[in-house]
Image (cartoon, grey):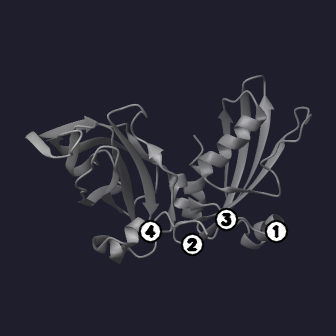
Amino acid sequence: EVADPAAAIYAIPELANLGRAFRSTAPVHLTESETEYVVQCTKHIFASHVVLQFSVQNTIDDQRLDNVTVLLDDSESEIFTVSGEIACDGIKYGDTKHCFAILERNAEIQLTPSHFTCELRFTVVQVDSTTGEEEGDKFEEEYPLEDLEIATSDFMAKVAVPDFRKAWEAVGNENEVLEKFALQFKKMEDAVAAVLDFLGMQACDGTATVKPNAGGKPHMLHMSGVFVGGQQVLSRAQIVMQGTNSVVLKIAVRSEDSDVSRIVADCIR
């Protein structure tokens, strides 16, 4: 059985009132791997909040890190505001511990990608590298991290449907959104992978695989997923190579909510 990535959240009393996570993303690196401090972020998606779990590893043998937080600048985002943070203490050499930031989502504003500048803040405690005993002064430290993006696809769970055509017809076209895009890709396979990545959806009917020797024919991609709040979303995409380094993408998105269909169609960039 796969461990629940949100298990760490449920163990924290301050976060218990958020309920169950809708989904958790794969961790993203906010530092290079060879740096003094290694930081990764896992995004836990809830109905009206996002909890950011920062895994912080200390790779300096004569330091212990106390009162560790990640400061996020939310001034550029209309959708999210930082509503709380939970620090961690006592990160010894070689250890990894977790601190958290809680973002509240404004449900009145349609989801679009949001970017945050991030900074690791902590107190450095000088220690003897062999005994771990404290020695010397403590001092405050700030360490810039990579920017963090919260993408619309973070709010989509990959959920397959047993019969795509049947599900497509059952949802109907009342809330369908149709779009056409020109994208820069030299290979059909890369375009298909990118569309799946943009939308965060599950390919159906084996359509993630491009037939060899398709000979420039359009490729049809069928996708399904569940958007935060439990909305089933289905999408059909036609991808056609145009010249040697671009494709034309025609996409149709269906759900029970026209706003959700629009949000998903707008994931293409």
Q: Nearer the viewer, mark 1 or mark 4?
A: 4
Q: Residue at x 67, y 65 (%)?
A: 159
Q: CA distance from mark 3 to mark 4?
A: 21 Å
- Image position of 225 with respect to 119: above or below: below
Numbered label attached to residue 159: 3
Asked if residue 140 lies left or right of residue 129, the reply is left
Label 3 near label 2: C-beta < 8 Å? no
Pick whichever, 179 or 196, lies toward us: 196
Q: Earlier in the sequence, mark 2 or mark 1?
A: 1
Residue closest to the far front? 131
Determine whether 17 is above or below 202 in the image.
Answer: below
Viewer-proximal residue among 188 and 10: 10
Estimate the x, y position of residue 185 in percent, counting from the top left.
69, 30
Of label 3 and label 4, which has the lower sequence position? 4
Question: Helix, strand or loop at disc 3?
Answer: loop
- Amino acid marked by disc 3: Val
Q: For the residue labelled by badge 1, is the local secondary structure a helix, a strand or a loop? A: loop
Instruction: Please identify, in this view, whether the residue under mark 1 or under mark 3 is nearer the observer.
Output: 3
Image quarter (top left, top right, bottom left or bottom right) of the C terminus: top right
Find out whether the residues at labels 1 and 4 contact each other: C-beta distance under 8 Å: no
